[in-house]
Image: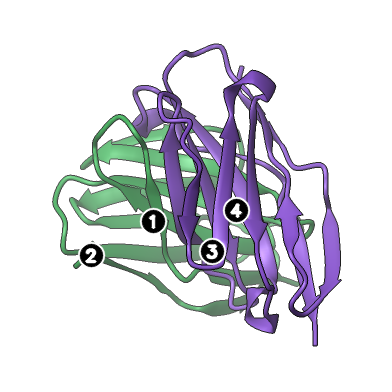
Amino acid sequence: SQTIHQWPATLVQPVGSPLSLECTVEGTSNPNLYWYRQAAGRGLQLLFYSVGIGQISSEVPQNLSASRPQDRQFILSSKKLLLSDSGFYLCAWSVRDFTDTQYFGPGTRLTVL
Amino acid sequence: AQKVTQAQTEISVVEKEDVTLDCVYETRDTTYYLFWYKQPPSGELVFLIRRNSFDEQNEISGRYSWNFQKSTSSFNFTITASQVVDSAVYFCALSEEGGGADGLTFGKGTHLIIQP
């Protein structure tokens, strides 16, 4: 069966520090991968999606970036964190079909101080 | 553009009551998919159900049931005999045919509180 991992689970970082969040998927090949952010107030915002290695699309302009160095690995990064980057970051995967049924990881709670 | 509206921000009921969570969607596509996810306090979004636009049959899974009505663009979720473990934020979501690159459009969620 497929599983999705994210780490770290929680992170507290100072403003201006770099960020690296990692997501890996097991049990499937060639998945679509997604990064979402959920700020206070619960809304989910799609940040990045990837349909293959090295193929990243950004949904919103920001100081975050994403990379997909391997088929089942998705990394979210920042060179300098802002206070507004605080939130709950969720990684998701989906099979490449027409339904886009997405399955989510456990999330990383990021607090920028 | 697609849109999902969950008008109920928060619902609080006493255990064993039935509760319905509303979801209204907008899309120009004739083929689309609707979803419900549950987000318990731990934070992980748990997939509950997917329906496609050609299948309007209602679905029941234990205490959960879903009512899909294309005429009103609604996909409501009912929990029968609610339990404290049902307390969570519930999200309705939509994807249009083609999937993948466009991601899911989520509603803002309904926080369901089941009081013992």
- Residue A18's mark? 3
- Whether marks 1 and 4 lie on the same chain: yes
Pointer 4 chain: A
Q: Which residue is mark 4?
A: A37
Tell me which amino acid carries mark 3: Pro
Q: Return the residue found at the far bottom.
A: B116
Q: In this structure image, what is the colour of chain B?
A: purple
> Which element is circle 1 on?
strand
Distance Cα–Cα, label 3 vs label 4: 17 Å
Q: Which quarter of the rendered picture does the C terminus of chain A lie within? A: bottom right
Tell me where residue B23 sits by quadrant: top right
Distance Cα–Cα, label 4 vs label 2: 22 Å
Q: Which residue is mark 1?
A: A103
Distance Cα–Cα, label 3 vs label 2: 30 Å
Looking at the image, tell me whether mark 4 or mark 2 is earlier in sequence order: 2
Tell me which amino acid carries mark 1: Tyr
Tell me which amino acid carries mark 2: Gln
Distance Cα–Cα, label 1 vs label 4: 15 Å
Q: Which residue is mark 2?
A: A2
Looking at the image, tell me whether mark 1 or mark 4 is earlier in sequence order: 4
